[in-house]
Amino acid sequence: MPRYLFVVSSRDPGLFELLKERFADDANVEVILDRRAHPDPSVPRPPVERRRRPEVNEELRVSSYAVVTLP
């Protein structure tokens, strides 16, 4: 059975709390708050993106959360 990881933008703590409560009893769902800092143009960034799922960045930006299916 697949497992799901909800990554919620740190800009939306209310959504994080709502999803944590909603899925509290579901062992196949984990809800986490995005711990990455928001991009600061004055801070140098690594030249290569290290994340394996860069589409998550766009989903977080557009809808405040992303759902990742885990094996």
Image: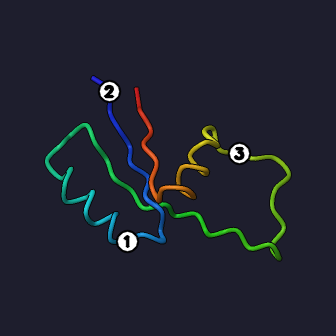
Kind of residue at disc 1: Pro
Q: Earlier in the sequence, mark 2 or mark 3?
A: 2
Q: Amino acid at mark 2?
A: Pro
- Residue 59 versus residue 28: which sits nearer the camera? 59
* Mark 3 residue type: Arg
Residue at the (61%, 50%) spot, across then down: 58
Whether pointer 2 and pointer 1 mark residues with C-beta atoms closer than 8 Å, the reply is no
Nearest to the eye among marks 2 and 3: give it: 2
Where is 3 relative to 15, above or below? above
| Nearer the camera: disc 2 or disc 1 | 1
Q: Quadrant of residue 54?
A: top right
Single out the mark in the foreground, 1 or 3: 1
Image quarter hosting the C terminus? top left
Mark number for residue 2?
2
Horizontal placement of 55 versus 39: left or right? left
Q: With 62 as the anchor, is 25 left or right in this view? A: left
Q: Which residue is mark 3?
A: 50
Most extreme residue toward the bottom is 42
Q: Which residue position holds label 1?
A: 13
Q: Position of residue 47 (x, y in %)?
A: 86, 52
Horizontal and vertical percent for residue 36?
Answer: 58, 63
Sequence-first disc among 1 and 3? 1
Left or right of 32? Residue 35 is: right
| Residue found 34% across the figure and 53% down from its top | 31
Determine whether the residue tagged by mark 1 lies in a helix, strand or loop. helix
Task: Estimate how packed mark 2 is, as few (under 14), some (14 to 19) or many (20 or more) residues with alpha carbons within 10 Å.
Answer: few
Q: Secondary structure at mark 2?
A: loop
Give me the residue at 54% from left, 49% from top.
59
Is the N terminus in the top left, top right, bottom left or bottom right quadrant?
A: top left
SS at mark 3? loop
41 vs 61, nearest the viewer: 61
Q: Identify the residue at image location x=31%, y=47%.
A: 30
